[in-house]
Image (spheres, rainbow, N blue to C red):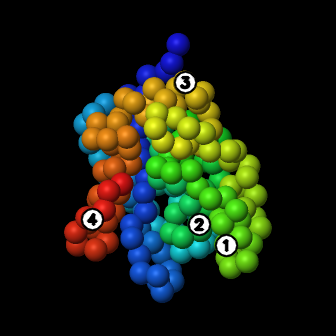
Amino acid sequence: MTRRFAHVVGFDDAPFARAHRGDVLVVGAVYAGTRLDGVLAARVRRDGANATRALVECVRRSRFRPQLHAVLLQGIAFAGFNVVDLAALHATLELPVLVVARRKPDLAKIRSALLEHVPGGARKWRLVERAGAMEAAAGLWVQRAGLSLADCESLLRRYALNGLMPEPLRAAHLIAGGVATGESRHRA
């Protein structure tokens, strides 16, 4: 029997200029069923190491925390290569965490970029590896902590209101883009 995920939050980062150094906005769209119930915001360092901590603090200080059943992430890294520790996020928040991507990432390119160009890249690569292999689910690619593949597919289908991408991630993407640039663009 699959679990019912009635309240979830989806996080995505805002667009930023290639030359930008410093903090980048991350937006969380909180959903109660199919209704947008609230918006959360945090900042993470470009190519930094504070994404996990920032997400934990953002969710914990939120009035929505008591109702949440799961956390969705648009990719395992925000603000370039600020890699989320999936296991730590799951354990600290005591919530299932699901990383979602439209396409299977090229891990060889990611590894090369992290190890050759990013400060702390070896530690970040270990976090990517520790999160586990990407799996196909409901037409998307996922990494997961704290939920079965069946629960993952059920959650994705429940929130796929306007295409394959779950609505909390689609809304977070649109909100982050609109706030950062004055207008949202591109699909989530």
Q: Mark 3 and mark 4 in contact? Answer it, CB < 8 Å.
A: no
Task: Point out the tag, 4 or 1, that comes first from the N-terminus.
Answer: 1
Q: Mark 4 and mark 1 in contact? Answer it, CB < 8 Å.
A: no
Q: What element carries label 2?
A: strand
Residue under label 2, please give it.
82
Q: What element carries label 3?
A: helix
Residue under label 3, please give it.
150
- Alpha-carbon distance for marks 3 and 4? 32 Å
Amino acid type, label 3: Ala
Task: Point out the tag, 1 or 2, that comes first from the N-terminus.
Answer: 2
* Residue 113 - label: 1
Is residue 185 in sight in this rendering? yes
* Residue 54 - label: none
Residue under label 4, please give it.
185
Label 1 crowd (10 A; few <14 / some 14-19 / many >=20): some
Label 4 crowd (10 A; few <14 / some 14-19 / many >=20): few
What is the residue that sits farthest to the top in this orientation?
Answer: 1
- The residue lying at 76 percent from left, 58 percent from top is 126
Label 2 crowd (10 A; few <14 / some 14-19 / many >=20): many
Amino acid type, label 1: Ala
Task: Point out the tag, 2 or 4, that comes first from the N-terminus.
Answer: 2
Q: Mark 1 and mark 2 in contact? Answer it, CB < 8 Å.
A: no
Q: Is mark 1 on a helix, strand or loop?
A: helix
Q: Please identify, in this view, whether the residue under mark 3 or under mark 2 is nearer the observer.
A: 3
Q: In this view, does 110 lie above or below 155?
A: below
Q: Position of residue 146 (x, y in %)?
A: 62, 33
- Alpha-carbon distance for marks 1 and 2? 13 Å
- Alpha-carbon distance for marks 4 and 1? 27 Å
Q: Quadrant of residue 128?
A: bottom right
Q: Is residue 34 above or below residue 172?
A: above
- Alpha-carbon distance for marks 3 and 1? 33 Å
Amino acid type, label 4: Arg
